[in-house]
Amino acid sequence: MVRHEEVKIGVIDHAIRFPLRKSKVSPNYVFPASHKVKGGNLNTQAPTPMGMRLRLKANIDLSSYSPKNRIILNAMKKYGIILTDIGSDFFITGAPDPAWNNSELTQLGKLRATDFEVIQMGTIK
């Protein structure tokens, strides 16, 4: 989860959680997750288990994003994002804080799955 105070000081030093629709999640998990979700993705060549870790590709241009969003996106490049929940695809959640600018954060909706690469896929259970 992203916290506004992290963005305010300019550093997010951890991976960020993200959800996918249930139909896109495979019924498996990888560390650090410890639970399965009954999902709809049964493609063993492209599994999407809970705990899957992705990283924003290095060549993704961040110049069109606001400075605050670039802080979030740089964390995605350095630490990645981890599949932790069922929900709207790639909907990045923030801790509740009135200082968030929701219209600014909607820019993050421009990201696509193809902007990411898998960086951690241990033993699928």
Image: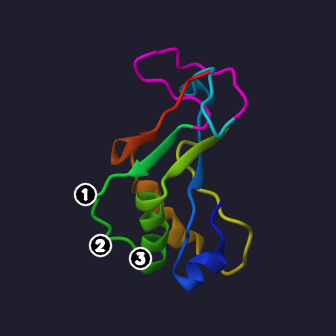
Q: Is 41 colored magenta in this rendering?
A: yes
- Contact, mark 3 vs mark 1 (Cβ under 8 Å): no
- Among the two numbered marks 3 and 1 on one chain, the one whose residue lies closer to the N terminus: 1
Q: Nearer the viewer, residue 91 or 5?
A: 5
The residue identified by callout 1 is: 59
Label 2 sits on residue: 63
Pick whichever, 110 or 25, lies toward us: 25
SS under mark 3: loop
Q: Is residue 103 left or right of residue 74?
A: right
Amino acid under label 1?
Answer: Asn
User: Which residue corresponds to the image point at 41% horizontal and 76% vertical from the top-left?
Assistant: 66
Q: Which residue is mark 3?
A: 66
**Residue ID at (46%, 59%):** 76
Q: Secondary structure at mark 2?
A: loop
Magenta segment, prevailing SS (helix, strand or loop): loop
The stretch of residues the image draws in magenta is 34-51
Instruction: Residue 40 in the image: state x and y as whole percent.
Output: 58, 19
Please say if 39 is above or below 16. above
Binning the other alpha carbons within 10 Å of mark 3 as few (below 14), some (14 to 19) or many (20 upward) gives few
Residue 46, position as x, y percentages in the image: 42, 23
